[in-house]
Image (cartoon, helix red, strand yellow):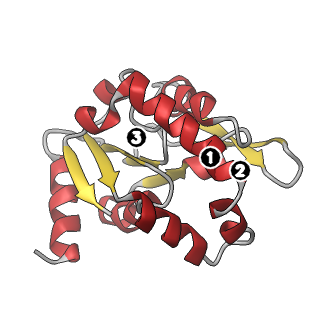
């Protein structure tokens, strides 16, 4: 099956039985969540939230997970507070249209609290060596430093805590190989 066919099938599953598809994409750092979210959102004409824009710093995975339910998936005036990584502080509020489809991607997106609010739940799986290699190859400033720094371990510990608390792979409707 080609990747375009797979994307079309994911989009179809997200739309099934729902006037407003809501897709949650979770996985570990470097697994392919952002790539999948960016490819899937246009097929659904969906708003895309990348949790990298939301995490309140390197210790913020759990707080961003809470914001998915508290802020992004709420019925009235949904949105999220952006994080200014350079200043190390909260930034602007981004409003979301509660009538339009929504794709949220990032480590911590899929939790026991968020799962019932989604029409499609996706876990992206990739082995540790490939994930780290992908992060090193990103054309993002400091990405290689992240993969080879203590921040990798700090983030991995939070991902581990998230996996222990929520078991997002088990909550997923679909497991995608990154």
Question: Which quadrant of the rendered structure holds the C terminus?
Answer: bottom left
Nearer to us: label 2 or label 3: 2
First-in-chain label (2 vs 3): 3
Image quadrant containing the N terminus:
bottom left
Q: In which quarter of the image is residue 99?
A: top left
Q: In this view, does 98 lie above or below 161?
A: below
Q: Is mark 1 on a helix, strand or loop?
A: helix
Looking at this view, is 129 or 174 the one in front?
A: 129
Looking at the image, which is closer to me, 135 or 21? 135
Q: What element carries label 2?
A: helix
Q: Residue 97 carries which label?
A: none
Q: Where is residue 154 drawn, in percent x and y?
A: 65, 42
Question: Which residue is found at the position 72% from the left and 38% from the top?
Answer: 56
Q: How far apart are marks 1 and 2 (CA)?
A: 5 Å
- In the displayed structure, does residue 76 sit left or right of residue 44? right
Task: Please name the residue that numbered disc 3 is placed on.
Answer: 99
**Residue at the limit of the structure toward the right, as seen here:** 87
Mark 2 surroundings: few (<14), some (14-19) or many (≥20) residues within 10 A: few
| Sequence order check, earlier mark of 3 and 1 | 3
> In the visual, does 88 lie left or right of 33?
right
**Would you name the residue on which mark 2 appears?**
150
């Amino acid at each position: 099956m080609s990747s375009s066919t797979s994307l079309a099938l994911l989009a179809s599953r997200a739309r099934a039985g729902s006037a407003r598809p809501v897709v949650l994409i979770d996985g570990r750092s470097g697994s392919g969540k952002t790539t999948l979210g960016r490819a899937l959102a246009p097929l659904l004409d969906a708003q895309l939230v990348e949790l990298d824009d939301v995490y309140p710093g390197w210790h913020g995975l759990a707080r961003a997970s809470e914001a998915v339910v508290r802020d992004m998936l709420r019925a009235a005036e949904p949105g999220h507070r952006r994080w200014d990584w350079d200043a190390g502080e909260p930034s602007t509020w981004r409003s979301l249209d509660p009538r339009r489809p929504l794709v949220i991607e990032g480590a911590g997106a899929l939790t026991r609290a968020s799962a019932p609010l989604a029409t499609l739940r996706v876990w992206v799986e990739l082995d540790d060596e490939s994930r780290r290699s992908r992060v090193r190859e990103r054309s993002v400033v400091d990405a290689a430093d992240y993969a080879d720094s203590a921040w990798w371990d700090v983030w991995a510990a939070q991902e581990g805590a998230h996996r222990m608390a929520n078991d997002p792979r088990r909550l997923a409707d679909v497991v995608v190989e990154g």
